[in-house]
Every structure is written in C-alpha cells, then in structure tokens.
Image (cartoon, coloured by chain):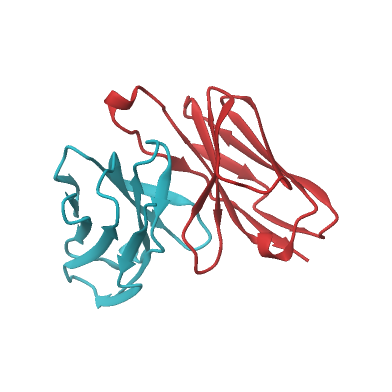
Amino acid sequence: ETGVTQTPRHLVMGMTNKKSLKCEQHLGHNAMYWYKQSAKKPLELMFVYNFKEQTENNSVPSRFSPECPNSSHLFLHLHTLQPEDSALYLCASSQRGDIRDGNQPQHFGDGTRLSIL
Amino acid sequence: KQEVTQIPAALSVPEGENLVLNCSFTDSAIYNLQWFRQDPGKGLTSLLLIQSSQREQTSGRLNASLDKSSGRSTLYIAASQPGDSATYLCAASNTGFQKLVFGTGTRLLVSP
C-alpha cells in the first residue's frame, strides 16, 4: 500500500452536482490536511485535522465540507462548486507531536484533478 | 503574513551540472522550512526539512541551507541527472507549525 492514497484521480462535475473526494493514509499518522493547487498559484492549505478534530479552516467557502471519521481517512464533500474551483486537490498526512519535537514532514497523495463544467 | 518566493521560475541545465535553487521568505520567525519535489500529475515528495535551529540538511546529492536572518534558503543539487527534472517547491512553517506556506516553485529540466 502506498503511503497516502487519493480517489478518484480525476473528476469532472457540473456546478450543481454533489461529489466527494477520498483520502486514506497507511502511515499511522494522526494529522491530515487538504490543499488546493491551482495553475500559476502556490499550494493553499484548506483544512487541518488532528486526531479527527478540525483545527484549521483557512477561510474556505462552505461549498467545501471536510469530514474526518478516523485518523486514517479524510473526505472532502463538494457541493455547488464554481468554475474557479477547478484545481488539483491534494491530501497530506503527518505525525503531529509536541511542538518541541520539531515538525515532521508532511506526506502527500497524488491528488484529485477536479474540473468544473 | 508570510510570503514565499522562488527564483528562478524555470531552469534548464545539461546533465552533470551543479545547481542552486533559491527560496526567500518574508517572516523570519519560522518553525521550519521544507523542500519538496513534484513530478507532473503527481503529489509532493518531501526532500529535506530544516528545523529553525538548524543551518542545513543533506540527503545524498541534495543539500539545503537555511539563513533565517536574511530570510533565505537554498537547495543545492550536485551532479544533476535527467531524473532530477521536476518542479521543486519550498514551504515555510510559522503561524502554527503545521501550516505550510508554499512558493510557486522552480521547474527544473536536466537534459542528457
């Protein structure tokens, strides 16, 4: 099993559709993340979950709804998206320790390429 | 607000050359700085992570340095190979050590 798996790899949807992105990590980590990567723009952090609890929402519109049922799985529910939401959505995980432990690297999946018609 | 800049945006070199990629950040109060590699259509692979108390990290042909006072980090790639062709991203972590702020990357092409 690869470390972080994202499905589907590609998704095309209309603006009125509802779909979900799935992320699963097999690394035993306790923190998971959603990022958005748009063309010509830096990666943007969207959400952070620690021990299944959301600890960061980076002012993301409510049409994106994350869900973290356990430390290994993370979903991003999509509803009534806009054309500007077309992007590569990346999931990552890491082991969150005490801040004195220093930071552990985040491990990324290959992403879901989302296209909004 | 932290801003991360990477120069150059693209770089093309012949195989065997040593090269340096640059990353600058505006807020020096960082917890760490990470370098990633991204291949086309793929996610990110962590290459090196430098804690704020460290000056450099090395892994194989890669060496990353950190100078917080000047707000700079460099990634040195020795004896470049065609397989090194990818986009290289740096990311700084400060406001909350899990929050990474990314640069837009340097797209590297190493030709045989």
- Report how many numbered discs are placed on residues in the image: 0
Q: Is residue B2 left or right of residue B81?
A: right
Q: In the image, is residue B88 above or below residue A56? A: below
The residue closer to the viewer here, B49 or A1, is B49
Q: In the image, is residue A69 above or below residue A77? A: above
Chain A pictured colour: red
Q: Quadrant of residue A83?
A: bottom right
Q: What residue is shown at x 47% (from left), y 29% (from top)?
A: A27
Q: Quadrant of residue A101?
A: top left
Position of residue B68 measured from the top left corner of the image (x, y, whole percent): 19, 49
Position of residue B85 measured from the top left corner of the image (x, y, whole percent): 35, 66
Chain identifier for the cyan-coloured part of the image: B
Q: What residue is shown at x 84% (from left), y 53% (from top)?
A: A17
Q: What residue is shown at x 78% (from left), y 66% (from top)?
A: A117
Q: In the image, is residue B5 above or below residue B49? A: below
- The residue positioned farthest toward the right in the image shown: A16
Position of residue A2 measured from the top left corner of the image (x, y, whole percent): 51, 38
Q: What residue is shown at x 34% (from left), y 42% (from top)?
A: B94
